[in-house]
Amino acid sequence: MPERYAAIASTGIYVPPIVMTPEDFERKTGIKVDPLFIERTGLRVKRIAPPEETPATMAAKAASMALERAGMTIEDIDMIILGTDTPEAISPPTAPKVLNLLGGSSYEIPSFDVNASCANPVYMLELASSIIAGNPKYRNILVIGVYAMTRFLRWKFMWEWIFSDGAGAVVLTSSKEPGYLAGKLRADGSFWDYWGIFLGAWKPVAEQISDENLPFLDLRKAYPPVNDQYWPVLIRDVMNQANIGLDDITQIIFTQVRLKTILDVMKGLGLPETKTHWVMDKFGYTGSACVYMALHDAIEQGKIEKGKVVIFVASGVGYQQGAVAFRWVER
């Protein structure tokens, strides 16, 4: 059997139309967003999904764009993997609803959710690439990251300025030459209770509903600088696995949560700022979607060189982190 590899065929995004400025946030909450916080994070706006949008509808719109750009329809897709920590419901999963919205229910396409929090984009690329390489039944896999975190805000804290809504999608397809090159995932459960939405099955729901904090995003403890510490380690790991050097890299696309960290990591690696791309200034922080949204925007701006390597780096609460490397190959 000839070797099979996963390659990125296309991308798509959905950007909500509602734009909130720091001044709008202050009018809504009475809380002024610290200008230094804005400068360090790069988060200059919030994007908010209108009431009629849900995680599934946003995901379907991003997926539709990705399919169109790949020259495919839902009939060409062999699997859908959706990553989110803001699903439509605890159960059932969101992915089958997205399949239905895309018109693919009659094709019996396996569709399921994963939740590695905001590290979802990297985890899904690693998972889908492994499936394509290892099983000839799966030629084209649609991966979608979607984030609707503004639905879980109390609008009482300055840190809530961080969170926006949006969706990003990638079509992965089988290739005779390597697109996917390497990946490294890690988790540290000692951070499990630092930050999250803690309503769940850890005890009877009837005992939880009296706690007004549980249905909402809750910041319980401040994280140490885990991204500053581990992002360079993850990048060097996949570079070593793939046997590539700094000159091979066209872009490193990071979780879009703190611009200062991104630029510090790039400087520490000895790479110019032009070798990374950020969108938090116009899309806000969109968690499970942000890496794909940044990739899509970088492609639109002509920043991805064919034959060169793109490294994706992502982090999320839990604590989850990962990096994957892809060579940008012709389909």
Image: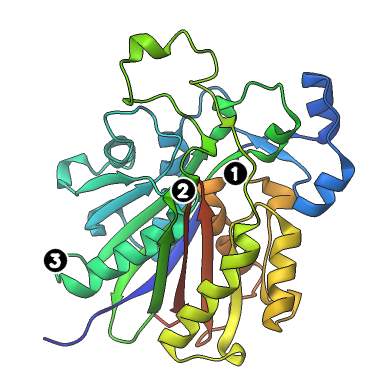
The residue positioned 86% from the left and 39% from the top of the image is: 34
Residues at marks 2 and 3, CA–CA distance in whole angstroms: 38 Å
The residue positioned 38% from the left and 45% from the top of the image is: 115
Look at the image and name its color scheme.
Answer: rainbow
Residue at mark 2? 190
Residue at mark 1? 15
Which of the 4 image quadrants contains residue 195?
A: top right
Q: Secondary structure at mark 3?
A: loop
Examine the rendered structure and indicate whether residue 152 appears above or below residue 74.
Answer: above
Q: Secondary structure at mark 1?
A: loop
Question: Is 223 on the left or on the right of 183, as rendered?
Answer: right
Residues at marks 3 and 1, CA–CA distance in whole angstroms: 33 Å
Task: Give the position of the N terminus as an image quadrant.
Answer: bottom left
Residue type highlighted by circle 2: Ser
Residues at marks 1 and 2, CA–CA distance in whole angstroms: 34 Å
Residue 185 image offset from top left, x and y in percent: 41, 65
Earlier residue among tags 1 and 2: 1
Q: Nearer the viewer, residue 39 or 173?
A: 39
- Mark 1 closeness class: few <14, some 14–19, many ≥20 residues within 10 Å: many
The residue positioned 33% from the left and 87% from the top of the image is: 177
Examine the rendered structure and indicate whether residue 33 appears above or below residue 75.
Answer: above
The single residue placed furthest to the right in the displayed view is 35
Residue 198 image offset from top left, x and y in percent: 45, 28
Residue type highlighted by circle 3: Lys
Task: Give the position of the C terminus as an image quadrant.
Answer: bottom left
- Mark 2 closeness class: few <14, some 14–19, many ≥20 residues within 10 Å: few
Residue type highlighted by circle 1: Val
Residue at mark 3? 137
Examine the rendered structure and indicate whether residue 72 appears above or below residue 50.
Answer: below
